[in-house]
Image (cartoon, grey):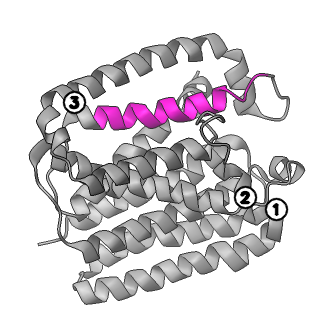
Amino acid sequence: MGNKIIRFIFFGNYFVGLLAVALTLEATQQLRLPYNSLNYFLLLFLAPTIYYTYAYNRVSTKPSATNPRNQWYFVHKKFINWSQGILFTICMLLAINLLYQNFNNFLKLPASYWIAILIIVIAGGLYYGLLPKSFLKFNLRSTGWLKAFVIGFVWACCANVLPLIMLKIETGIGYHDSVLWTWLFIKNWMFCTVNAIIFDIKDYPTDSNKHLRTFVVRYGLRRTIFNILIPLLIIGLISLGIFTYFKGFGFPQVFFNVLPFMLTIYVAYSMHRRKNILYYLMVIDGLILFKAICGIIGMQFVL
C-alpha cells in the first residue's frame, strides 16, 4: 500500500507541484515580499503537475520492462486521463477566477512583464516539444547539453519571476532590489541546472541511443560528476560566500544556505553507481525541496 502511494505521488508528478510551491515560498521569504493569494498557489501546484504528467503520458504508449514509470503510466492510463481532465478543469477555473478578480491590473501590466511571461511559456513548451510543429519545429531537448540549463531557467522563473508578476497583478506592489533578486535568480537557476544534470544520469542509456548529447553522454559519468557537477557546486558556494559577505548575513543564514550545496555535492559524488527511478524522483528532486526548506529556515534568523 505504501509503495503504491509513493508511486502515485512521484510518478503522478504531485511532488513536482509541491516543489514549485516550496521554491516560491522560499523566494517570497528571501525577498521579504507579501505572499501571493491562495488561488495563485493552487494554480502553481496544479500547472506543473498537469504539464509533466501530460508530457510523460504522451510518450508512454507501450509498456516497458525496464522503466517502472513507463509501466505505471501504461497500467493507469485511464485513471491518468480522467484525473488530468479534472485537474485541468480546476486549473482553468482558478485561472478564470484570477483573471476576473484582477482584470484591470492585467490590462495595466507593463510590457516587460508580458515579455517575461511569453519567454517562460515558450521555454516550457519547447523543452518537451509540446508546441505544434507547424508553429515551431525546434525542440530544446534535442540540443542535449542545453536542456539542463533550460530546465533550470524555467524553474528559476517559476520561483523568482512569476511570484513578482502575480504580486504586481494582485497588489500593485513592485520589487526594486535588483542585486538581491538577480543573485537569487542565478542561484536557483544554477542549482536546478545541476539537479537536471544529475537527473540526466538516469536517462544515459536512452539518450546515448538517441544520440542526444547530454553532459553524461558527451563526457561520461565520472567526468560529468568530477569535472562539471562538483565544480559548478563549488563555484556556487564561492559566490554564496561573496554575496553573504557583502550583504552582511549572519552565521545561521549562511549555514542553512550552504547545507543544500553540501548535500548536493555528496549526492553527486554518490552517483557513480546507478540508482532506480524512484531514487532519482525522491532524492534528487528532494534536494530542491531541501533547499527551499533551508532557505525558509535561514530567513527566520533575519532581524
Region rendered in magenta: 41-61
Going by the image, does 163 lie left or right of 108? right
Can you say whether 48 is above or below 180 in the image?
above
Kindly report which numbered mark, 2 or 1, lies closer to the viewer in this rendering.
Answer: 2
Q: Amino acid at mark 2?
A: Gly
Q: Earlier in the sequence, mark 1 or mark 3?
A: 3
Residue 200 at x, y = what percent?
A: 70, 55
How far is disc 1 from disc 3 in space, using C-alphas? 44 Å
Kindly report which numbered mark, 2 or 3, lies closer to the viewer in this rendering.
Answer: 3
Name the residue rendered at 60%, 36% in the picture.
Answer: 130
Task: List the residue tagged with mark 3.
Answer: 99
Task: List the residue tagged with mark 1.
Answer: 217
Residue 95 at x, y = what percent?
A: 29, 28
Q: Amino acid at mark 1?
A: Val
Going by the image, does 65 lie left or right of 299? right
Q: Residues within 10 Å of mark 2 (few under 14, many from 20)?
A: some
- What secondary structure is found at the residue carrying circle 3? helix
Can you say whether 246 is above or below 102 in the image?
below
